Image (tube, grey):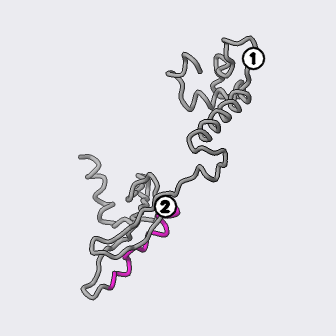
Amino acid sequence: MGAYSGDANLNTLLHSLDGGASGVPPSRDYFDDIGTPQVETASEILLASLREALDAATALFGTSDMNAWRSLRPVTVFAHPLGPEIGQMPTSNRSTYLQVSELSQPIAAWNILPLGQSGFIQPDGAPSAHFGDQLALYRQFQLRPMPLVKLAVAHLPAILKR
């Protein structure tokens, strides 16, 4: 994108790829290198970029075998402070607690806590029934409905006015 690269973002790329069919058609052909006599197409530029990326990865890993370019993905281990391991999953860049609240009528909410609703372990070592019970949902990026107590909902308008 030459001198315009500082002004470009993903939206610019998407609109440029859509061309005249874009809801915001580009004012210029961002894929044509005006420093060359030929007119380059988006496909040609994307293919050249792919070739450059493949060449760079081949040089970095010392082989063109893409299977050798992979490294083991780190694993997040969920463990209780008292020691028991609750579960594992591949590391991902995400929060460990998520809550979504929809301030609609009626109010709706969902949340997920990977280690479950309760981390209680009895003196004999037996975990509570809700110990780690949300990990399977968390692994699948799912949420569970969060029941709202009627009393809390009744007081919400006053809380929101503060």
The residue identified by callout 2 is 90
- Of all residues, the one furthest to the right in this rendering is 38
Camera-side residue: 74 or 2?
Answer: 74
Q: Main secondary structure of the magenta part?
A: loop
Task: Name which of mark 1 and mark 2 comes first in the sequence.
Answer: 1
In the image as oriented, which residue stretches furthest toward the front? 62
* Tag 2: amino acid: Pro
- Identify the image quadrant of the N terminus: top right
Q: CA distance from mark 1 to mark 2?
A: 45 Å
User: In the visual, does 128 lie left or right of 20?
Assistant: left
Task: Identify the image quadrant of residue 107.
Answer: bottom left
Q: Is residue 7 magenta?
A: no
Q: Residues within 10 Å of mark 2 (few under 14, many from 20)?
A: few
Q: Which residue in the protein does label 1 denote?
A: 39
Residue drawn at (32%, 72%) of the image = 80
Q: What element does badge 2 sit on?
A: strand
Query: What residue is rendered at 35% in x and 70% in y?
Result: 79
Answer whether labels 1 and 2 touch (C-beta < 8 Å). no
- Magenta residue span: 126-140
Q: Using residue 43 as the reference point, say whether residue 82 is left or right of it.
A: left
Q: Amino acid at mark 1?
A: Val
Q: Position of residue 116 (x, y in %)?
A: 38, 71
Residue 94 in percent (x, y) is at 43, 53
